[in-house]
Structures are given as C-alpha cells and as structure tokens.
Amino acid sequence: MANFSYKALQKDGSLTKGQIKASDRGEVMRSLERQGFQPVKVWEEVVSGTVGSSSDKQESKEGGKSFAWFSKPHSNKKVSEGPVKLKKAQVVLFTEELSDMLEAGLQLEPALKAMESRSELGPLKELATRVRQLVRDGMSFSHAIARVSPSFGGLYCSLAHAGEAAGALDVILARQAEYLKNLHEMQGRITTALIYPAFLVVTAIIVAVIFVTSLIPELINIVASSPGAEVPAMANVLMGFSSFVKQWWVVMLLFILACVFLFKAWRDNEANHPKWDEIKATFPLVKGVVRSRFYVQFLETMSNLTGNGLTLVRALELTCEATPNLFFKQKLEEVLKEVGDGRSFSRSLVRCGIFPSLLTDMVAVGEQIGDLSKSLRRAAERFDKELNKALQRVMAFIMPVILFLMAILVGTMLWLMVSALFQTMENLGGVR
C-alpha cells in the first residue's frame, strides 16, 4: 500500500485535498468517485531515499512529490502550446457537443474527455485536450477556453463565466450554440445570395474581353480585306479600343491592381475603419442588408445575455464589444451611456437614431411586461425575416441590372458580327 495525495472538486464546486492509502492510482480514483469527488490531481507520496523504478524517479519532482494526470491514455501525449484557431462552424460544433453532454448529466471534465477521445485528429481534439488539462488543474472553463483559443471571443467567455457562477453552464452553452448557429446560417445566406451575381459579372467580363480582343478584330479584318468594304463606325471604335487594350493591357492591369491595393490600404488603416463602416451602413444599395444583419445580431446577443441573468448595462457592454461595425458600435456606446445614466432602454434606442420604430416599440413592450429577453428574441425573429426580405430586394435589383448590361454587351457584339457578315456578303456580290 502506498500513500497518495489528491486534489478534487466536491459536489458544490469547492476544492478539497487529502491523502488516501491505496495500491495504485486506479483505486484512488474509484474511492474518490464513491465519495462524489471529481479528481483534479492525484500523485503518490515519495519517501526520501526510497529506491523506485525509473518512471517513479522521473515523476519525483519539487519537494519529493510527483503527480500525473490520472487519464493514462493521454499522459504521454504531446500537445502544442500555440493558440488553437477554429472556424466558425467548428466553434458551433464544439459548443453543441459540449452542451449536449452537459445536459445529459456528464460533468465538465468527463465531457471534455469524451470529446478528446474522438478518433479523428484536428483542432477540436486538440482544443478539448488542452482545455481539459487546464480544467483538471483547477482553472475555470471560461478562463481555460480564453487561454487556449482566440476563436471564441470575449462575449463567449463572459457568458461561460456567468454560467459557471450561476451553476447553469449547460443552459448557457445550449443557448450560445443556438445563437452561434443562427449567426453562421445568416452569414451563409448572405454569401450564397452574392455568389450568382458575382458569377454573372465575371462571366460578362470574360465574354467582353474575348469579343473585343479576338472575335471582333477577326471579323473586321475580313470585312476590310474585301473590295469596296466599308467598316461600320461602331466597329472602328471597338477596333481602336481593342488595339488600345492589346498595347496597354499591362499598364491597365497594374493601374487596377494599384487602385485595389490603395483602397485596401485605406480600408485597413485603423483610422479609416469608422468611415468605411459608416459607408457600408449608409450606402443605398446595401444598407438594408447591413442594418438588418446588425439588428438581428444585436437583438440575439442582448436576448441571450439578459436571458442568462446579466444586468442590462453589462449586457450592453458585452454587446458593444462584440459589434464589429465601428459605426454601430459608437451608437451602442451612446445607448450604454444613457442607460447608465438612468434612462430607459427603449428611449435610449429611440434617441440613438439608427433603430427602426418597430424594434423600439417591441423593446418598450418587453420593459412594460417585465420580460425583456423574450421581447428581444421575438424582435430578433422578426428582423431575421426582414433580413431575408432585404436580401431578396437586393437580389431582385441586382439580377435585372446585370442581365440588362449583359444583354446590351452581347447584343452589341452580335450586331457587329452580323453587320460585318452582311457587309462582306454585299461586297462580294458587288464584285460579281
């Protein structure tokens, strides 16, 4: 029998420590589980001067004590120390899996261990491994997830911290998984809606380049080589443009790249971020989509935070931190200041000037009935529908414009081709 020291979490979450006599670590683990403890560290007390195996000597460190993570399958596993970067879909998947396990009755460390045991390699497996190690070392889940990966953000970690403090981490993670899933789907809808117009624009540019640089010049040369030929004026214009493009295409390409580079440099300059965000929020064609997206994210975030027990001021602070658009962030800071001064939430939104009356009215109703979180969630659902309508309106405007421009381009090319063919036929007939 050997003496083992341990650190473990009790049912109320407090940390306890003690010693147990046992034949091995497995027996210590079973004994702690029977007492309702969750082991954090287990190590064997090493008596000074005792001769042991090489592995025991290697474990003997600092004050004659040694410790090892109890999970043997991962005790020798090397884990990288850099930040684990995840895609948004992976963050959603991790949150969903962990919340499902916690709701099923598993404690945090066994749930992370189950996720760590997944067969496929990848960032999720590494994330679960490193977070579980920190949790077993006594660190809270919110601090562990913030230390291991920057992909979760301050809002996520603050919510997790609030859930740990309230003893409702499973509920918080379930709501957060739903929230992240909705945001991911919304971004996917926007990206999908822009794929087809972008494809049409690229196709139109390629067709124009082929016609102007290849087909039209060939036809014009055929017409010009026939006796008594008269080249149409429009064809001469296109021929001049084609010659200009062929001669100066390198300069034109460099000019376009320089413009793109300068615009990107201006946009990436931190001092210009507020102006660029304001342009996106006020540009006539896209402001409906940009604003509706902001309304949905704002309402979903506020509903999630206030529904999890955070105060209105703290919820607004976290929402400001989670808002990427600096124009909207500045407006929310004005709302936060007024709410902090004692003004009602709905009146502060009205004075802000960027929120529609429907949204502020629904918030006012939530304040009156004493269920702000529910009203915010209903408003989020309403404006999610408005976002879909805004996307449909943009698509309904963009598609006809692109098709009209393509029809003019292709029609002009076809007219020039047909005119050139008829001119050639007339010239050949005159020669006979």
Image (tube, rainbow, N blue to C red):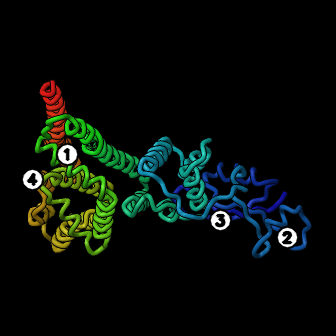
- Say left or right for 64 vs 9: right
- Say left or right for 192 vs 167: left
Number of marks in the image?
4
In the rendering, at what x and y percent does residue 337 appear? 19, 73
* Label 4 crowd (10 A; few <14 / some 14-19 / many >=20): some
Q: Earlier in the sequence, mark 2 or mark 1?
A: 2
- Residue annotated with mark 1: 387
Residue displayed at 25% across by 55% down: 244
Quarter of the rendering occupied by the N terminus? bottom right
- Residue annotated with mark 4: 361
Q: Earlier in the sequence, mark 1 or mark 4?
A: 4
Q: CA distance from mark 3 to mark 4?
A: 55 Å
- Foreground mark, 2 or 1, reads 1
In the rendering, at what x and y percent does residue 291 appear? 18, 55
| Residue 5 circle label | none
Q: Earlier in the sequence, mark 4 or mark 2?
A: 2
Q: CA distance from mark 1 to mark 3?
A: 55 Å
| Residue 47 circle label | 2
Name the residue type under label 2.
Val
Name the residue type under label 1.
Leu
Say which of 121 and 69 sits in front.
121
